[in-house]
Structure formats: structure tokens, C-alpha cells
Amino acid sequence: MTFPHIAAPGRGSTHPVAGAPLLCNALEHGLAGDGTTNDQPALAALVDRLGDAYAADGRARVIYCPPGVYSIRDAGTVWRAGVSLVGAGPGATRFLLSNAGNRADPTPLAFYTAALHDADPQRHLEYCTFADFEIDGSGVAMAEYNPLAKGLGLQYVVRGVFRNLYIHHTAATGLGCDFLQDCLIDGVLVVGCGRLDNGTEMGGAGIGIGVGGWGSVERANVVNCSAVGNATNGIFFELQVEGALRPRGLRVIGCHAEGNRFGVSDWGANGLIVSACTMTGNVEAGFHVSAKGTTSTAGRGGILSDCVIDGNLRDGISIGNTPGPYTIRGNRISGNGRYGYHQRSLGGEQQECAREIVIDGNDFYGNSLDAIRLDRPIRDALITNNRIRANGRQCGTGSRGGGDSVRYSEKTAVDRRATWQHDEHRGKVLRVGERVAVVAANDSTDLHLAPNRPGAFTAWSADTPAPGTPYELPAAPDVRAGITVDAALDAATIRANRIWDSHEPQTQTHGIWVTEHGSCVSCRVEENDLAGNAEAPIRLDTPPVGGRWERNHGDEARD
């Protein structure tokens, strides 16, 4: 079996080319690091010199940037194979990106792309390390969103390493590198990236990895990274080439995604593994699978395991438009503003039915509406061994108010006359005239509102309402079940789940609910413990057809 792009023995020369040292101190090669001098021309010249040397003798070179502030203005640097850039650590070695003198140029620190530089599997970058420095992209401004306005934007990289980087406030994606083979992204912190994304662009991520350039396998690991407050995804994988093979070999391990639009997303991989991560406070969903990417292709065959998915403003897990399979196993899925797990349609390619979705051994609790909501047809699903308790926390009746007891700020609404139950309005849309905001949490008198987009200073769709302006909160849904089937569910197995609510007051109304729009055909619903829900163990607005419904504790009438 052959492995493309694995280095052959003995490729490199014993001695470097004369005049091109293996380790270069940037301050000795034209860079100033004083925060004032434009260091981009000197950096570009040094990269070219060392890249030529690597091409000649096969010995990789390193540019070391001592502590300092390196101004990179008005042009990005086209990177070369065999050249690494390392600093003295984030905060010590800082690259400040700006384009005040050339607003047409997106000015990434380093880029190398198929469209601009003919990058491909034969003309790839290799042996490039970027480590121990900071990229500040706050100085880049453009008339419209440009996906090249990244911190690092490289394509077709072999044996690349991105380690201990702090990348923040870039106009587009912070670390946006595509087609990575045998690459490692380790300990990268991305904050506030995608500043120029107006909410309609699908760029603007913290870490964005395009896939589909190397065939069926792309070996890349994202480990120990944090993505906070980025415009779209914290960390995501996107199939870039329409009709290309969805690659295996991609992993996200031990990462944290907070306050992004989506925490971690799969937009076209095959067998993506996401494990031991935390996804919290994201605006749309903690974990997201959809066909929203450039090729309208959803991920499939992935595994999400051993993660904490908590306090996201809408869904904990949102999965749509994948044909399946997908496995959700051993996670804590709690305190989300709508559903814990949501199977739904999300634009792009339309599949009639997802197959072989597995939801096994998870802990669902404290979600605002249903723990598991199936709004899209599924066949051969397996929902087993989950603990599903005390969901449906969004139980508040409709509420109105105004006058001298009501006041507003950028992220709060207060009514001193209210007597609300804790978090009974979480996830609702608050309306004040023409303005809207989403409730992230509430106590007896205060509504705490979510920012209207990642990193925003206000929750409101327009200006902050004046004191006393009347508000309106809608009523909660009457039924908030542990498992809700609102689409065709065929040949599914729902077994050995414990679904109950022992909190006071009880808010999870039913264990299992099949709505008037849902159906269960040839399903096996067995050995579930459904005792202890607020209203009933099971509600069947559409009777099941075929299959087996038996030995469900709390629903002895059906046995």
C-alpha cells in the first residue's frame, strides 16, 4: 500500500546552501519589530530566500522573531515550502495586520492558495511550522467581506504544524487552511474572528479547514484549541470541491468552543471524530452538521463523544441534511435554550430520509424544550441507554409589561413587578415594539439577553428600548417531551432510556410524544422507564404502525 506525500528516506542534503542559514533571527534580516516599521517587505524577501534554499537542498529553515511588535501592512506574504515562522510566545511576539494604505488587499500574515498561486497536490507546502506568536487582525478594513482576510490562509499543506498561536479579530477566518495532510493544529486560541461577516457569509470562523483536496483520506488533528466569539463557526470542516470524496482522518480532541454562531461544525467530512470537547454559549448550536457549506454537502459517518454541550442559546446539537450515519455517544447535553438534540432540515441538498442515526448513552437535562426533537424523517435510528430528565424548563406562560417598573439595557430587560420562575423564559424571543432579543436566562425580575450575534455589545435588533416601553413574551409550548417525533420515523429502536422529571415544579410533560405530523412505523419501543413525567409517560397523536411497544415502565396500559 502506498501513502502519497510520505517523505522518502535520504531526501535532504547534509549541508545547507551557503548564505541561507537554517535558523534566521528576523531582526538580523531586515525586520524591525518596533511596531512602526512595515516589516512585510522584509519578511516576504526572507521567506523567498529561504524557500529557494529549501528547494535547492531540501533542508527546512526557521525564521525566529524575538519579542517585539511586527507591523504587517498593505500586503500578505506568499509562503514557501520548507519555511517556518516561530516567535517567543503570544503577547511577546505580535504581528499586527493592517491595510490602511491599500484597502483592496486583505493582508493575511501568510497565504498560499490554488486560485492565486496554483497550489495543488504537486505544488504543495511542506515542513512549515507556525508557532508561539500572536496575530492581531483588527487593523484590516475592507468595503466588503473578503474570505482572504485571514490570519493564516494556506492550501495544500503537508506535515504542517500550527502550535501555541493567539489569533484574534481578523476580518475573515482566523486560521483558515485547506487540504491538510499529516498536519497538527495544537493549542491555538482564536477570538473574535470574522469581524466583517455580516451574518450571511459562511466564512468568518475561528479555525476553518477545507477538505476534499487529497482524495479519501486527509490526516489532520485539531487538539487543545479554544475558539471564542467568532462570527460563524468556532471550529469547522467544509468540503471545498464539489463532487470530491468526503475524506476520513479528521479529528477534534479536547477543544473548547464558546460564544460563536456554531461551536463545532461538520459541513462535508466523512467520519469526523469530535471527542472530549466543551461547546457552550454558542448562538445557534453547540455542534452542527449541515449542508450550508460552499458545496452544499453535509458531513456523514461522524462520531461525537464524551463532550459537554451546555448552555447554547438554541440547540445543543443540530443535525440536518446529512444522509447519515452519525453517532452521538456519551455526552452531557444540558441547559440549552431550545432542544438538546435537533434533527432538522438546514438548507442545501435535500435528502428525503437520514439513516442510522445513533443517540446512545447521553445525559440530557435542563434543556428548555424537548431533549430530543426529530423534525426530519429518519430510518433505522437507534436511541438507547440515555438519561433524559427535567427538560422543558421553558415553561412560562405569556407575559406582558410596561410602565415605571420596566427598564432596559444593552443585554437586560427588567420588570420589578414580575415574579418569574427561574429560566422559565429561556430561549424565548422578547418583543419590544419592532425590536426583538433572545432570552439567555432569567430570574424572578430580570431577563438576561443573548448578544444578537457573536461578539456584539447589544442583544437588540435595533436601538435599546426606552424605559417603560411595553414588552411581550410568548407562551411556552404546551407539550415539552423527552423524545418528540414530528416526522416519519421508520424501523427505529428506542430502548432502555430513563425519561423522567423529579424536579419541582415538573416541566417535562411527557416521556415520548408522537405528534400529529409524526409517525412511527415498524419501530421497537421497549424497556424504557417513563415513570415520573409531569403529565403522562407517552402521548400518541398519531398511533404507531407495526413494530413493538412493550415493557415500558410507567406505560403498563400498552403492555
Image (cartoon, helix red, strand yellow):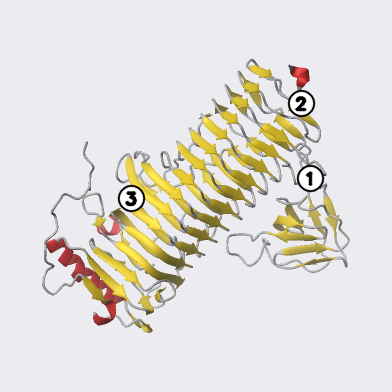
Disc 2 on helix, strand or loop? loop
Left or right, 312 with respect to 442, comes to: left
Q: Amino acid at mark 1?
A: Cys
Crowdedness of circle 3 by 10 Å Cα count: few (<14), some, many (20+)? many
Residue 88 higher or lower than 413, as above or below? below
Q: Which residue in the structure is indicated by mark 2?
A: 554
Q: Between disc 2 and disc 1, whose residue precedes?
A: 1
Q: Are marks 3 and 2 in contact (CB under 8 Å)?
A: no
| Residue 108 visible in the shown view | no
Q: Which residue in the structure is indicated by mark 1?
A: 395
Q: Position of residue 411 (x, y in %)?
A: 70, 64
Q: Are marks 1 and 3 in contact (CB under 8 Å)?
A: no
Q: Amino acid at mark 2?
A: Gly
Left or right, 9 with respect to 204, comes to: left
Residue 523 higher or lower than 138, as above or below? above
Residue 424 higher or lower than 379, as above or below? below
Disc 3 on helix, strand or loop? strand
Task: Locate the N terminus by quadrant.
Answer: top left
